Image: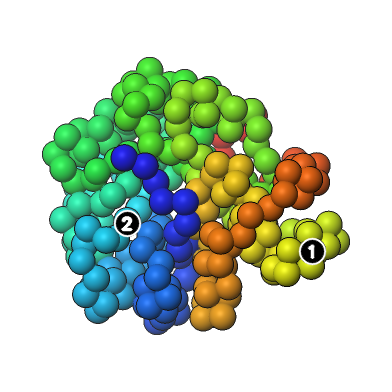
Amino acid sequence: MSIPAFGLGTFRLQGQVVIDSVSTGLDLGYRAIDTAQIYENEADVGQAIADKGIPRDELFITSKIWIANFAEGQLIPSLKESLRKLKTDYLDLTLIHWPSPQNQVPVAEFMGQLLEAKRLGLTRQIGVSNFTVALMKEAIAAVGAENIATNQIELHPYLQNRTVVDFATRHGIQITSYMTLAYGEVLKDPLIQAIAQRNQATPAQVTLAWAMQSGYAVIPSSTQRANLQSNLKAVQLTLSEADMAQINGLERGHRLTSPKGIAPQWD
C-alpha cells in the first residue's frame, strides 16, 4: 500500500470552517483527508465526509495519536474514539503525532500498540510524524521499517530536512511534507514567483509540484474554494530539472514548528 501524493490538511480548522473546507475539497475531487486528535476537529471532519456519501474505499483518511494517549492501554481506546468521531470503522493511516516528551513512554511501547491496532484492523497503515533519525531507528527496531508507511515532517523549500529524508528513503519510508508552503512565506520568494511566471502557474502550485516531484506527499489546507481548486492543479504541473535545482537551493534551515516541551532534538 502507499500514501496518496496529494491530500487535504485540516490543521487549525474547526467547526463550520473545517466542515466547509472538507466538503468543498471532496466536491473538487480531494479524496485524502488528514486530521489529528489534537486538532479537535475529527467529529467535524467525520460529519463533512458522511454528508457527502462518498464510498469509504474511495477515501484515504489519516489521523494522529496525541502524546497524552501513548501509555499502555490508552492508545487503542483513543483510536477507537477517533474512529467514532470520524464515523468510520478504520483509518487508512494512523500516525504517532509527536514523539513522547523526554521519552516518558518509550518508542517501542507506543509503536507496539500502534502495530496491534493495525493487526486488529483499526487502521490499514501506521506511521510517525516529527521523528528524527534517532527516533526512526527506534521505531524500526520496534516494528520493522516495512510497518512504517510514512514520517510526516515539516518540509518546505526553506527547510528541506535532508538528513531525515535520506534516512527514511533508504528504509523505504515515504515522506509526507506538512507546511509545504511555510505558512505562505515561500509564496513571496522572488525565485518561486519567477518559476511560477515561467510555468504559467501560481507560486503555491510550483511549491507543491516541487515537493511531489521530490517524492513527497503533500497535504495543503485552505478555507477558500479557489485556493483548494488551484492547489489541486499542482498535480498536473511538471517542473524542469533547472527549476527543481533552483528551488533545492533555497534551503536555509528555517524551522517554523518546534513546540516547547514536545519537540525532539532536531537533526
Image point (26%, 57%), residue name? 82
The residue located at (37%, 67%) in the rendering is: 41
**Residue 235 pos. (x, y %):** 54, 59
Image position of 251 with respect to 10: above or below: above
Question: 72 or 160, which is in the foreground?
Answer: 160
Q: Is residue 251 above or below residue 179?
A: above
Residue sitting at 34 percent across and 26 percent down? 146
The amino acid on which the numbered mark 2 sits, given as a three-letter code, is Ile
Quick check: 132 left or right of 48?
right
Q: Which one is in front in this view, the residue at disc 1 or the one at disc 2?
A: 1
* Mark 2 Cα-neighbour bin, 10 Å: few <14, some 14–19, many ≥20: many
Between discs 1 and 2, the one toward the N terminus: 2
Q: Which residue is mark 1?
A: 198
Horizontal and vertical percent for residue 213?
A: 60, 46
Apparent side of residue 179 relative to residue 68 in the rendered image (left or right): right
Q: Secondary structure at mark 1?
A: helix
Q: Residue furthest right?
A: 190
Question: In the image, residue 133 lies at what x, y percent?
Answer: 55, 25
Q: Position of residue 177 (x, y in %)?
A: 55, 48
Q: For mark 2, what is the residue? A: 61
Viewport quadrant of the C terminus: top right
- Mark 1 to mark 2 CA distance (whole Å): 35 Å
